[in-house]
Image (tube, helix red, strand yellow):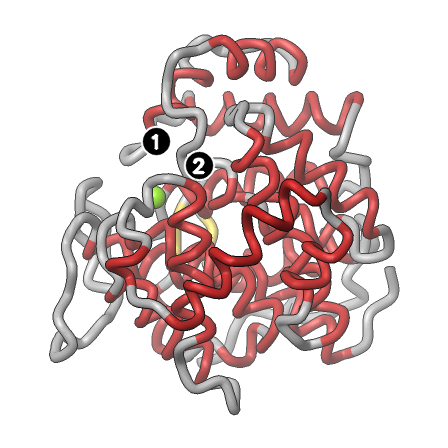
C-alpha cells in the first residue's frame, strides 16, 4: 500500500512504540511503582534485561513482521507456516521471560502452523493468557488495505498458541484498532470493531471497555489474563491527557504504573499509541536505548514496520540512513 508521510510515521510507530512500552515495563514486572517513581528504561526485572532491551512481546511481534514484510499473506498457507516457523526459531534462541502457554506450545517444536494450532488447542496451559495479544500489532500493518484480511490474520495467528475465544476477540479488536489508527489517526477503531462484531462479543466487551475508561487498575488486576491486559492498556490510553503526541509517553508510563505484567500491558498499549501518534512521538532518549532480538535497534524496527505496511516494497530510501542523534 502506498502511504502518505503521516501514515508512514504512524506505521513506523507501531513496532517502535510496542518495543518502547515493552522495554519500559521490563524493569517493573510484578511490581506496582508508586506515583512518585520516575518510569524509565531501567532494565532488570525477571529476565535480567539490559536497560532498553525489549522482551518476548516485541521479539514475537518481530517474528511475525519479518514474514509479513516479504509481502506474503500471513493469514493462511505458506505465510502462516512461515510465522509458526519464526516462532520456533525465536524459541530456539533461548529467550528469557517467555510466557507459560507460549512456551508449552513452542517447546513441542511444531513443524507447521496446523500442528502448532492443534497443540495449542489441546494443551492444558493458560490458553487465555495475554501472550497472543501482546504480539499482534504488526498484523495490522500487513493488512492496511484489507479490513477483513486483518481480522482473519489476527485470528489465525492468535490461535497458533492461544486457543481461547476471548483471546481471539482481543487480538481481532486490538489489531483492527491499530490498523484504523494508522489509517485515520484516531482511537475510534476499537468501538468500530465492536459495531461489526457478534452480539456475544459486543455484549461482553462494551461494558468492560466502558468500565476501563472510568475505573482504576484495581478493577482489572489480573492483567496476565488477556481480558484484563487489554483493559489495562485501554485504561492507560483513555485516562491520560490525549491532546498531543506527549500522550504516547504519558500513557506508556501509566500502563507501567498499573503494575503486574508491566512489559506486556505497556507493549500492548504501545502498539496502538504508536499507530495513533507515530514514531516521531517516541522520546529520542528511549529510541536511542532500544535494542533486542535478533540484534535490532530502533531504526530496524521502523524500517521493518514500513516495509510490512508497504507489502514488501522497497523503501525508496526512506529512513535507510543510520539514525542521527
Ligand atoms: Mg515480556
Q: Position of residue 257 (x, y in %)?
A: 24, 66
Q: Nearer the viewer, residue 235 or 101?
A: 235
Q: Quick check: 213 above or below 78?
A: below
Q: Which mark is residue 131?
A: 2
Instruction: Tally the marks.
Output: 2
Question: Mark 1 highlights which residue?
Answer: 99
Q: Is mark 1 within 8 Å of ligand 1?
A: yes
Q: Which mark is residue 313?
A: none
Q: Quadrant of residue 198?
A: top right
- The quadrant in which the C terminus is found is bottom left
Q: Is residue 163 left or right of residue 74?
A: left
- Residue 96 visible? The answer is yes
- The quadrant in which the N terminus is found is bottom right
Q: Quick check: 190 above or below 240?
A: above
Q: Is mark 2 within 8 Å of ligand 1?
A: no
Q: Is residue 76 left or right of residue 34?
A: right
Q: Are marks 1 and 2 in contact (CB under 8 Å)?
A: yes
Q: Is residue 216 left or right of residue 18?
A: left
Q: Quadrant of residue 145?
A: bottom right
Amino acid at each position: 500500500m502506498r502511504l502518505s508521510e503521516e501514515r508512514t510515521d504512524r506505521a513506523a510507530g507501531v513496532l517502535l512504540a510496542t518495543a518502547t512500552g515493552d522495554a519500559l515495563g521490563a524493569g517493573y514486572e510484578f511490581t506496582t511503582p508508586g506515583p512518585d517513581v520516575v518510569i524509565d528504561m531501567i532494565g532488570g526485572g525477571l529476565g535480567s534485561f539490559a536497560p532498553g532491551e525489549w522482551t518476548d512481546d516485541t521479539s514475537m511481534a518481530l517474528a511475525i513482521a519479518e514474514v509479513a514484510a516479504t509481502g506474503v499473506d500471513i493469514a493462511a498457507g505458506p505465510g502462516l507456516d512461515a510465522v509458526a516457523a519464526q516462532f520456533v526459531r525465536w524459541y530456539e534462541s533461548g529467550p528469557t521471560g517467555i510466557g507459560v502457554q507460549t512456551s508449552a506450545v513452542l517447546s513441542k517444536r511444531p513443524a507447521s502452523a496446523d500442528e502448532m494450532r492443534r497443540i495449542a488447542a489441546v494443551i492444558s496451559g493458560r490458553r487465555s493468557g495475554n501472550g497472543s495479544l501482546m504480539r499482534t500489532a504488526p498484523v495490522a500493518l500487513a493488512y492496511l488495505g484489507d479490513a477483513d484480511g486483518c481480522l482473519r490474520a489476527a485470528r489465525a495467528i492468535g490461535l497458533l498458541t492461544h486457543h481461547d475465544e476471548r483471546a481471539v476477540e482481543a487480538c481481532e479488536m486490538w489489531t483492527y484498532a491499530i490498523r484504523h489508527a494508522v489509517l485515520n489517526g484516531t482511537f475510534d477503531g476499537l468501538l468500530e470493531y465492536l459495531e461489526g462484531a457478534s452480539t456475544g462479543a459486543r455484549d461482553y466487551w462494551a461494558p468492560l471497555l466502558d468500565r476501563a475508561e472510568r475505573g482504576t487498575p484495581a478493577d482489572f488486576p489480573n492483567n496476565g489474563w488477556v481480558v484484563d491486559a487489554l483493559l489495562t492498556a485501554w485504561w492507560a490510553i483513555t485516562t491520560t491527557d490525549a491532546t498531543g503526541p506527549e500522550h504516547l509517553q504519558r500513557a506508556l508510563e501509566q500502563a507501567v504504573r498499573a503494575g503486574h505484567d508491566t512489559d506486556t500491558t505497556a507493549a500492548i498499549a504501545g502498539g496502538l499509541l504508536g499507530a495513533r501518534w507515530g514514531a516521531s512521538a517516541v522520546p529520542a532518549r528511549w529510541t536511542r536505548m532500544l535494542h533486542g532480538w535478533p540484534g535490532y535497534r530502533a531504526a530496524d524496527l521502523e524500517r521493518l514496520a514500513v516495509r510490512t505496511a508497504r507489502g514488501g516494497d522497497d523503501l525508496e530510501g526512506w529512513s535507510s540512513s543510520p539514525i542521527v542523534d
